[in-house]
Image (tube, rainbow, N blue to C red):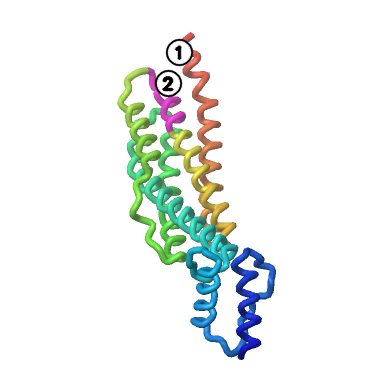
Amino acid sequence: MQNARYLTAIRMRHWLCGNHSYPRTPLGGLRPGSILTLAQRLRKQAGRPPVTLRNPNLNQCHVKAKIRRRLALARKKDLYSAETQLVKALPKMAKAANDPALRAGFEKHLEETTIHVDRLEEAAEILGVSPKGKSCKAMKGLVEEGAEVMMEEGQPSLKDLALIVAAQKVEHYEIAGYGSARTIAEVLGQRDVVKLLQATLDEEGATDEALTRLSLNIIPQVAGVEA
């Protein structure tokens, strides 16, 4: 027993002095409470404040993992709020569009957006959390900007072009949001969640490209009117 206490004391000294590479396997004959008491006694003799026994490297990893999980959850809640806001805004944008192709594009993306909401709910269910509880202020601002465009009067093709600009701002925000959320999910090893986020990210990218093609058809009409 004396030898065990002596060896434990040596190990504790190495531990308290920061030599974490020194073997720290517990020895038989000493209960965890006894080890903690011995450590606190050595700290007191050295004139240092008492601390709990904890591997700082492991604790740091735990904190980082916790931060990543919280960040991932915050991103998903933010995206869920953004998508639900967009579900309400897209029908109004479709109604305000003059170009038939643009109107059809907004209607198609509305159907996709409802699926995006379902995917986020599925991802939240996999993680055992609720996707609700956060309001996306960025999307709120983008939706309000789009509403201002819809209220403007002027040449139809020019208004359609302004709607495309407003819609692409939304798409770029969502692409950034889904991209970062997918990356965090990859780091955390959430493979099923990654697949859901990637599917939506691909659709957001396709919508952005479709809007660009529509704008290329409408720009000459605007240029012709102003000429």
Q: Position of residue 185 (x, y in %)?
A: 54, 57
Q: Nearer the viewer, residue 198 or 188?
A: 188
Query: Tag 2's secondary structure?
Result: helix
* Image disc number at residue 159: none
Q: Which residue is mark 2?
A: 158
Which residue range is magenta in the image?
155-166
Q: Which residue is mark 1?
A: 225
Q: Does residue 101 show up?
A: no
Q: Position of residue 77 (x, y in %)?
A: 40, 52
Query: Tag 1's secondary structure?
Result: helix
Which of the 4 image quarters holds residue 14? bottom right
- Give, as a three-letter code, the residue at label 2: Leu
Task: Please identify, in this view, whether the residue under mark 2 or under mark 1 is nearer the observer.
Answer: 2
- Give, as a three-letter code, the residue at label 1: Val
Q: Nearer the viewer, residue 11 or 20?
A: 11
Q: Residue at x 44, y 62 (%)?
A: 122
Q: CA distance from mark 2 to mark 1?
A: 9 Å
Q: Residue at x 62, y 65 (%)?
A: 17
Which of the 4 image quarters holds residue 145? top left
